[in-house]
Structures are given as structure tokens and as C-alpha cells.
Amino acid sequence: MRRFLPALAALLATFLLGACGYIGDPLPPLANVPKRVDDLAAIQRGASVIVQFTVPAVTTENHPIPGPVKVDLRAGAADQFDENQWAASSRQIPPVTLTDHTARYEIPATEWTGKEIIFGVRIVAGNGKQSGWSNFVVVPVMLSLAKPTAVTATATAAGVRLTWQAPGAEFRVFRKTDGPDFALAATVQKPEFLDPQAEFGKPVTYTVQTIARHDAKIAESELSDPVTLTPVDKFPPATPAGLRASSAPNSIELTWDRNSEGDLAAYRIFRAVANGPFEKLADVSAVPTYSDRTVEPGKTYRYAITAVDRAGNESPRSPALEVVLP
């Protein structure tokens, strides 16, 4: 029995080591310092500065930040920037409610007009530990830009023509069609825009914004009230041109210049015998030729042509062409 006990102890030690793995030094405690914000963005819009950033969810060690998490957003003058001096003299902005870790502030900016303001943010954990300051953003605060008014959308043959009223030298036009969001359609230098991408029969919504540039920075006005239009095609094709004729023994062959409209559907042929009235002779495809085989020798005929689009709009008639069949 005495010889058996040492062997049993050795076997038990081997089993414990195999079950628990290597026993090393204890890990150091977590620092629990929040990650810094790295996507701080700010821009003047109207009489406010819009500030937005993502609030980190983890620490520098990729562990959840001990709660409750606080956001310390500050704004201060940009004179000879020093981080410590800026932090000591900057103003703390009251916190906002977070939406999916996204913070968005609308900060009144009138008192800063004519000045450059630096924004920075840091995150404070529930244990009181702070992240480093985020990337800093400088915003030159300008006089508030007027929101564009009287936005009008009109359908034309070339697209939707948009006009508005607003002082300024540069504007953004945003467009929305099938989806829920607006997309930038154009940046223009006068209060008008022609949208050739608009499609007849499909609703399109526009909103306009004035912008001003200061060095590499941009200030924005509030977006205009949206305007929606469903363009209707009421625009006839151009009058066919270049009508020509040649005589054959039993027919008159007509040709003319092809129309350039993308929605062209057909041509309509009109004929008059001698000085009689014009009557519709035929509708033909968009190919600019026609052979009139219902003519008689010795008679005089006059021809004219119109173009018809897919919406049924018809052009004015071409100038009449007189032909005498020998």
C-alpha cells in the first residue's frame, strides 16, 4: 500500500495537468481605455454646424467599453492651435442621443461668424478613463447661406428643366427617382439645371442647395423644399427635311433625311393629286423611304411627310414636293 500511494499521486498530477493545460503567469488587468474616434466630420449648413461621428463600442484591447459611455465633444478657436490649450479653453457641447453608435449634432453657429472653429471629441468610459482626442476638424463659419426658394420643374423635349431663386454662385442639385434617397445630380454655377436623364412617365423629385467655398472647406445652405414632377411627352418630333423624289415607270420613289429623335416611331405620308387637298397615303416605319405604286402616267402629284413619336405626337408637315409622272 505504501508503494502504491506515490504512483497514485503522480497519476493524479498528470491528469490535472492534461485537463487544465499550461499554468502560466496571471494576465495583467485590462486597461479599459476607449478607442478614439477617427471619423469626426463637420460642415456648416445654414446657421448651424453639423457634426457627426461614430462612437466606438470597444476599448483599445477590443473589449466592450465599461458603461455608461459619455461623449465629450468640444469646440474652440483655431488660433495657433495647441491641443492642451484648445482643450482647456474650448466649450463642451451638450450630448445628444446616439443612434446605432452614430452621434449627430446641429450646433448654432451665428456667434462664430467670421471665425475658424476647431471641433474635437473624446470618449469617456464608465470607469472614468478617456480615449485620446479624435481627428480635429476646422470649420470656417460664414454668413448663413440662403435656402433656395421657388424651385420649379418643367418638362421639355430635352429633359426636365429646373429653376430656382437664391443668391450665390454655386449650387448642388439632388435627384430622387425609384429609391428613398436623394443622389447628387449636378453642381452648377447658375440657378438652373437641365436634367437629360429624366424619363417621360416616371416621377422624379428634386431639391437644391446653395454652397460656398472657403479655401478647401465648403459651407452649405439648408436644402430647398422638394419638387416632384412626372414628365409627360407632349413634344412632337422635328419636321422631316430633305424630301426628294425619283420617277420609275409605274411608281414614284420618295426619300428624305432621317430624324434624330430617339423615340421616333413612324413617318406619315400625305399626297395630293394636282391642286387637290392632301390626304393621308400611308404610315411607314422609321426608315425614311416610300414607294408610291398607285400613281398614273401624266398626272401631277404633291407629297408631304410628318414624323410621329411613340407617344403619338406628330410633327408639322414638310414642305410640299411636286412630281409629274411621265
Image (cartoon, rainbow, N blue to C red):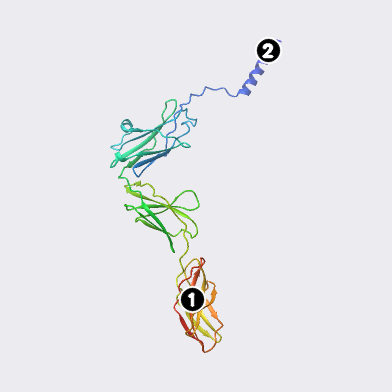
Q: How crowded is mark 1: few (under 14 residues within 10 Å), some or many (20 or more)?
A: many
The residue pinned by badge 1 equals 305
The circle drawn on residue 200 is none
Could you tell whether 313 is left or right of 80 in the image?
A: right
* Up/down of 45 relative to 37, above or below: below
Could you tell whether 164 is left or right of 182 in the image?
A: left
Residue type pointed to by label 1:
Ile
SS for dot 2: helix
* Up/down of 74 relative to 194, above or below: above
The residue pinned by badge 2 equals 5
Q: Which residue occupies 38% across, 54% down?
A: 151
Q: Distance between the residues labelled 1 and 2?
A: 118 Å
Residue 294 locus on image (x, y percent): 56, 83
* Up/down of 124 relative to 15, above or below: below
Q: Which residue lies furthest to the front in this view?
A: 277
Q: Which residue occupies 54% across, 80% down?
A: 291
Q: Which residue occupies 63% across, 18% down?
A: 13
**Quadrant location, the N terminus:** top right
Residue type pointed to by label 2:
Leu
Front one among 294 and 261: 294
Q: Are marks 1 and 2 in contact (CB under 8 Å)?
A: no
Q: Nearer the viewer, mark 1 or mark 2?
A: 1
Q: Which residue lies furthest to the top in this view?
A: 2
Q: Residues within 10 Å of mark 2 (few under 14, many from 20)?
A: few
SS for dot 1: strand
